């Protein structure tokens, strides 16, 4: 691989599941958002919406509701439930900020926005982790939490991105580079 600043950021980025409690600075937050908004979008539609949640009350209530939902689910394997038996299981892995990403129509452009955000986070020394499981809960049984996000009409909540100062440094997981076909 060619070595440059961007390829190092892409290579070094990991999903972080343990964060320090310190909140992002306003400059860090605005940098992440501006980098996200610089993402390409088909026809320059920019059909995304970002809701920034830094309220620990909201994240705590969401985490507890999600925990209760998981423990009550008779179909979930016990090993998953075991991760949520104690109080304090956080939907954001303890990250002080979660960016909830929504889109109107196609979600492809929002994917570009999100990837710009997580790469910008890495470049700032911040950790990030995509959050999908919590969105399933919010759509199925936690709709009041979606209402609190103030998402514009016609937009669909897609996923969250936990962001904060990492409190872990996980090793890279193996990648399968055989998943390529060449037509030359």
Image: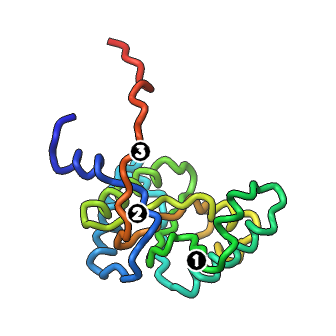
Neighbourhood count class around disc 3 (C-alpha, 10 Å): few under 14, some 14–19, many 20 upward? few
Residue 95 at x, y = what percent? 45, 74
Residue 140 appears in which quarter of the rendering?
Answer: bottom right
CA gap between label 3 and label 2 equals 16 Å
24 is higher (above) or lower (below) than 169: below
Residue 103 at x, y = what percent? 54, 58
- Does residue 147 appear in the picture of this structure? no
Task: Write down the residue under mark 2.
Answer: 128
Q: Is residue 110 left or right of residue 73?
A: left
The numbered mark, 3 or 1, whose residue comes first in the sequence reads 1
Q: Is residue 47 left or right of residue 44?
A: right
Residue at 42 percent across and 57 percent down: it is: 15
CA gap between label 2 and label 1 equals 23 Å
Disc 2 on helix, strand or loop? strand
Residue at 45 percent across and 61 percent down: it is: 129
Residue at 47 percent across and 69 percent down: it is: 99
Neighbourhood count class around disc 2 (C-alpha, 10 Å): few under 14, some 14–19, many 20 upward? many
Residue at 36 percent across and 83 percent down: it is: 22
Which image quadrant: the N terminus?
top left
Task: Write down the residue under mark 1.
Answer: 150
Task: Write down the residue under mark 3.
Answer: 173
Task: Name the disc covering residue 39, or none.
Answer: none
The numbered mark, 3 or 2, whose residue comes first in the sequence reads 2
Residue 19 appears in which quarter of the rendering?
Answer: bottom left
Neighbourhood count class around disc 1 (C-alpha, 10 Å): few under 14, some 14–19, many 20 upward? few
């Amino acid at each position: 691989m060619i070595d440059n600043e961007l390829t190092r950021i892409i290579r070094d980025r990991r999903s972080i599941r343990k964060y320090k409690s310190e909140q992002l600075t306003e400059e860090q937050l605005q940098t992440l958002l501006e980098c996200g908004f610089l993402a390409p979008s088909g026809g320059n539609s920019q059909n995304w919406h970002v809701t920034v949640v830094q309220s620990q009350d909201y994240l705590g209530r969401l985490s507890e509701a999600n925990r209760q939902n998981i423990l009550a689910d008779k179909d979930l394997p016990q090993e998953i439930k075991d991760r949520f038996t104690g109080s304090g299981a956080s939907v954001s892995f303890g990250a002080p900020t979660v960016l909830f990403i929504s889109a109107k129509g196609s979600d492809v452009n929002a994917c570009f926005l999100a990837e710009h955000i997580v790469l910008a986070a890495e470049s700032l020394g911040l950790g990030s982790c995509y959050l999908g499981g919590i969105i399933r809960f919010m759509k199925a049984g936690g709709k009041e939490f979606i209402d609190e996000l103030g998402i514009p009409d016609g937009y669909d909540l897609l996923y969250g991105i936990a962001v904060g100062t990492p409190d872990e440094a996980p090793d890279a997981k193996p990648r399968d580079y055989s998943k390529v076909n060449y037509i030359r």
